[in-house]
Image (cartoon, rainbow, N blue to C red):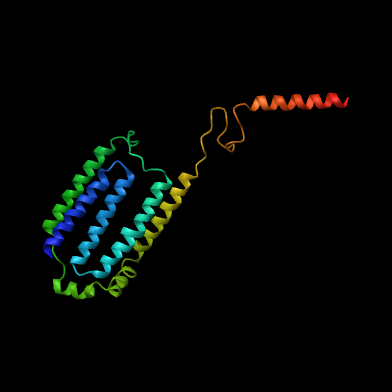
Amino acid sequence: MMLAFIILGALTLVGGVITIAARNAVHAALGLVGTLLSVGGLFATMNASFLAATQVIVYAGAIMVLFLFVIMLLNANQPVTGRDPVPFVRELAGIGGTLLAGAFVVLAFTYKDPAPLAQNVAALRNGTAGAVGETLLTRFLLPFEAVSVLLLVAIVGAVALVQRPVPQPDGVPDTEPAGLLAPDTGLVFEAVTQEAVLKERGRV
């Protein structure tokens, strides 16, 4: 069991690195899928069967389908080749990652279990749905609802980005529906005018 835990932990780290380092959004999403599946395996090695099933069904399944839907909706599956819009974003990300890694190292060497292991195992009740649901909907109710609102805002933002007006040629306002004006609009108008003049002369 310990060997499986180590292997799944290594796969989780590899998937996280792929998610961050991939220049293609679809490749990054697939790396995140591998990470979420590995985390589900970690839960299974700790006899938390309900958490493992929830991890695979909800996150590796439904949430990743949502991510891929947004990627395809925004047509963001092309590799990123342009310059970063935020100056020094790579340097700032490197500094932040270094500080976060240092914080985890300090936490790993200074952490002390606040309760005996047997007491914690008894509180988890073998990772059943009742224990998880009771903790999630009482102590962590506000973060749980905040995540659902965050996902809703992300979907609305993606749809709003897609519904932007189509850019028009120079001289044509963006508010004008596409396809109503053609490059030879003046010629068409002149032909219609001449036809109307000829009909008027015929009546006279």
**Nearest to the observer: residue 127 or residue 135:** 127
Residue 167, how many percent across, how many down? Answer: 51, 35
Residue at left 12%, top 58%? 110
- Image quarter of the N terminus: bottom left
- Image quarter of the C terminus: top right
Residue at left 20%, top 62%? 42
Residue 99, how many percent across, how many down? Answer: 19, 46
Image quadrant where residue 54 sits: bottom left
Res. 116 in view: no
Residue at left 18%, top 49%? 101
Image quadrant where residue 149 sits: bottom left
**In the image as oriented, which residue stretches furthest toward the right?**
204
Q: Classify 177 as above or below 160.
A: above
Res. 135 in view: yes
Residue at left 21%, top 66%? 44
Q: Is residue 169 left or right of residue 192?
A: left
Total tally of numbered discs in the picture: 0
Residue 131, how many percent across, how many down? Answer: 28, 73
Q: Classify 61 as above or below 127.
A: above
**Nearest to the observer: residue 63 or residue 139:** 63
**Nearest to the observer: residue 136 or residue 25:** 25
**In the image as oriented, which residue stretches furthest toward the front?**
202
Image quadrant where residue 111 sits: bottom left
Residue 114, how many percent across, how many down? Answer: 16, 67
